[in-house]
Amino acid sequence: MAREVREGLSATPKRLPSKLFYDEIGSALFEQITELPEYYLTRTERAIFEDYAAEILEAAGPSLTLVELGAGTASKTCILIEELLQLQSRALFYPIDVSPSALNEAVRQMALQFPQLRVSPIVADYTGGVPALARISGRKLVLYIGSSIGNFEPPQAVGMLRRIRRSLRASDALLLGTDLAKSSKILLPAYDDAQGVTARFNKNILDRLNRELEADFDVDAFKHIALWNKHCSRMEIYLESTAKQSVFVPAINMDVHFAAGERLHTENSYKYTDHMVNTILRESGFALERTWTDPKRWFGVHLARV
Ligand code: TRP
């Protein structure tokens, strides 16, 4: 963490790795974001699963084993599992996540809710590929939902999907959730809500440097900024210094200077067009088979074959 922070704060323009958002406080704030009226992503994807779970599973093929990348607490996945257990009497579920605590919670919840489901958690950073997937027999449906793919730069997204694909067989499929390109009138409030929860979430990254690296960021001297970059089809999230100021980060013995109005980049969130979805899947060795969307076409769930 110290090394990545040093690297990011030394760069021009300054940046911080977005994975720093998700400590315990950040994860709780993100949960709050998913329930905001402006943040349409989570509820829209959930509605697609509610409307089309049967179609999705049917298209993926019979006798499925589910795998979920970055499962977290796997709350949306329950909709698919419930439907799957209508189609087959038993099922296997392999949630994969870097966070053992999130996985334990998923396992506990699901074991209670679905006695016919065998849950085998895998603690791993899936971005490097998951070789253990190759040893799972039977037909797999790999879920990569929640628009997490959108937080990667497209070339990194392709690299990640390619590494996942290497552990899959011909009958296996990928179910990819992407947020879709849309009007900035919808996008901007989703990343800058009226209650200021998203601003707190973004600023938690500075609080975290204060807590964990003993830094002395004056968090109130930074402003949450969300911009729509139409050319790159992405939301860009920054923290903007409202004044000329200096910050000291003892853990890395670093003085950081900010000019008034200088921006620190914390996240990109790509909003996929049909063309972008096709391109990343093709370049990573998948073939897009079908897409399900909500009536407003705000979110896409894509089934792709190896
Ligand atoms: N993966 C989420 C997204 O891109 C994360 C997120 C939501 C986020 N709101 C944010 C990241 C605000 C940074 C700032 O939609």
Image (cartoon, rainbow, N blue to C red):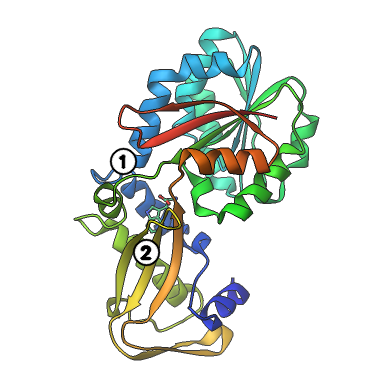
| Residue to which mark 2 is pinned | 202
Quadrant of the frame with the N terminus: bottom right
- Residue 198 place in picture, x, y as percent: 31, 58
Residue positioned most to the left? 194
Tell me which amino acid carries mark 2: Asn
Q: Earlier in the sequence, mark 2 or mark 1?
A: 1
Residue 111 locus on image (x, y percent): 54, 25
Is residue 162 or residue 53 the one in the foreground?
A: 162
Residue 43's image quarter?
top left
Which quadrant, please, contains the C terminus?
top right
Task: Name which quarter of the figure residue 289 lies in.
Answer: top right
Residue at x-position 49% and y-position 36%: 177
Instruction: Check disc 1 and give the amino acid type.
Output: Tyr
Which residue is label 1 attached to? Answer: 40
Do the CB atoms of the residues marked 2 and 1 lie less than 8 Å apart?
no
- Crowding at dot 1, Cα within 10 Å, few <14 / some 14-19 / many 20+, comes out as some
Q: Residue at x 43, y 19 (%)?
A: 52
Q: Nearer the viewer, residue 95 or 161?
A: 161
Relative horizontal placement of residue 72, taking residue 281 as reference (left or right): left
Residue at 47% x, 81% y: name it: 214
Q: Where ligand 1 lies, by quadrant?
A: bottom left
Question: 277 or 254: which is nearer to us?
Answer: 277
| Residue 19 in sight here | yes
Q: Is mark 2 within 8 Å of ligand 1?
A: yes
Q: Is residue 131 above or below residue 98?
A: above
